[in-house]
Image: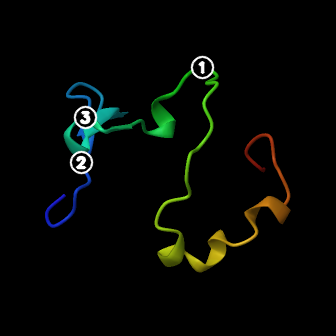
Amino acid sequence: MPGTRHVKSFCAKCGSALPSVQSQGALLAVPAGSLDSAIDTRPHAHICFASRAEWDAYLENIPKVDGLRG
């Protein structure tokens, strides 16, 4: 993306977001939607925390829903 250090990669056939190596190999960005199995790694940081959306506070306190409503 112009003016940032963020890069996005997409599949040429289906348009799905793909993992990409960034920051000269120091970072592997893996879009959550590209995962199809359980992973054993946990987040290391909540980045851009000071500029997060207002609704991002206290998400652990909202109801959990296992599927789509309706």
- Earlier-in-chain disc, 3 versus 2: 2
Amino acid type for the residue under numbered disc 1: Ser
Residue 68 in the image, given as x and y percentages of width and height = 73, 45
Q: Helix or strand or loop: what does disc 3 sit on?
A: helix
The span from disc 1 to disc 2 (Cα, nearest Å) is 24 Å
The residue that appears at 83% across and 51% down in the rendered structure is 64
Is disc 1 in contact with disc 2, using a CB cutoff of under 8 Å? no
Mark 2 falls on what kind of element?
loop
Mark 3: which amino acid?
Gly
Could you say where residue 26 lies in the image, as x and y percent from the top left? Answer: 30, 38
Q: Which residue is mark 1?
A: 37
Marks 3 and 2 sit apart, C-alpha to C-alpha, by 13 Å
**Residue to which mark 3 is pinned:** 25
Asked if residue 61 is positioned above or below residue 10 in the image, the reply reads below
Residue 7 tag number: 2
Q: Is residue 8 above or below residue 48?
A: above
